[in-house]
Image: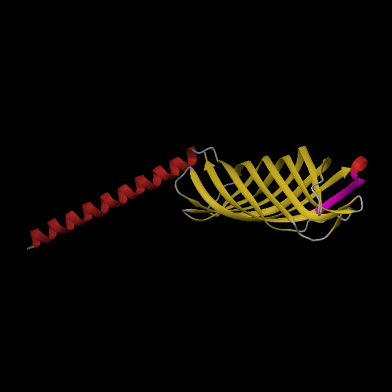
Amino acid sequence: MLLKNSLISMASFFLVSNAMAHEGHEHADNNKKEEQKVGVDFLINLENSAYTSFEMSDLKVKYKDQLRTAALQGVALYSLNKSDFGSFVIGGGIDNYMMQYKNIVKLNNYESNAKINMYSLSVKASGGYKFTPAKRLDVYALANVGYGVFNKADLTSVTLNSSNEQKNTLTIDNHISYGVNGIAAYKFNETFSMGLGLGATVHSMNISNKKDLGLDQTVNYVDVNSSLNFIFSI
């Protein structure tokens, strides 16, 4: 009986030791993988407006808050000072921003269905903190500032009760944006995550067409947006 108990004890000790060694090797391999990573996250963000405060006082409009926006962004973030809680991140990227504004406006003493389409390509700088509260969860808290390097826009109007259509080119100058956003992302593996975000961005720009519309106005508005985020880590 004593020999049997001894053999059982030795077998148990061997199994526990083997399991602990395997777990240690696995933990060491995970740490090695983390150390080998460059520490850069590439974010692709698809944004859609949930609310805007857009208003143009130079246009006599019938309704408020008729603005719709969307954006496709690419951002690279580099991690600094990593800890158990997360790391500071800093980086930048590009923002393809699209805006459409529909309203009934008064142009040349006639009420018209008007639509403004705008596209802006901006360069942006981003920074903030990347929290790692769980093994499979990353949370980004970011601040952003951007400047439009290429902008184009036009206004199409159709006079009410007629088919008279007029299209005018608008000049967009000094498009500046700044804001904050948060992203919660689920890590499928060490290199790919997918998440949802919420943010608020202030846009400021000058919109003008003095020759045809007598329009020259600086517009400031807040764009509250939701986003779908794809994250690739190296």
Question: Does 227 lie within the magenta span?
Answer: no
Observer-nearest of 158 and 183: 158
Looking at this rendering, what residue extends furthest in the left direction? Answer: 1
Where, by quadrant of the figure, is residue 176 drawn? top right
Furthest-front residue in view? 162
Instruction: Give left or right: position of 79 versus 97.
Output: left
Q: Is residue 186 above or below residue 37?
A: below
The mark tally for this picture is 0
Which color scheme is applied?
secondary structure
User: Which residue appears at 64% of the width and 44% of the height?
Assistant: 72
Q: Left or right of 28: which side holds 227?
A: right
Which residue corresponds to the image point at 26% horizontal and 54% vertical from the top-left? 16
Q: Quadrant of residue 6?
A: bottom left
Asked if residue 80 can be seen in this view, the reply is no
In this view, which residue lies farthest toward the bottom?
1
Visible in this render: residue 9?
yes
Q: Which residues are magenta?
A: 213-220
Q: Position of residue 48 (x, y in %)?
A: 65, 52
Which x, y percent locates residue 9?
Answer: 17, 58
Give the residue at x 79% y 47%. 163
The N terminus, quarter of image: bottom left
Query: Does 219 lie within the magenta span?
Result: yes
Q: Residue at x 46, y 44 (%)?
A: 190
> Of helix, strand and loop, which mostly describes the magenta segment?
strand
In the image, 88: left or right of 206? left
Q: Position of residue 76 (x, y in %)?
A: 61, 40
21 lies left or right of 177? left
Percent position of residue 193, x then y:
50, 48
Q: Nearer the viewer, residue 71 or 66?
A: 66
* In the image, residue 122 above or below residue 218: above
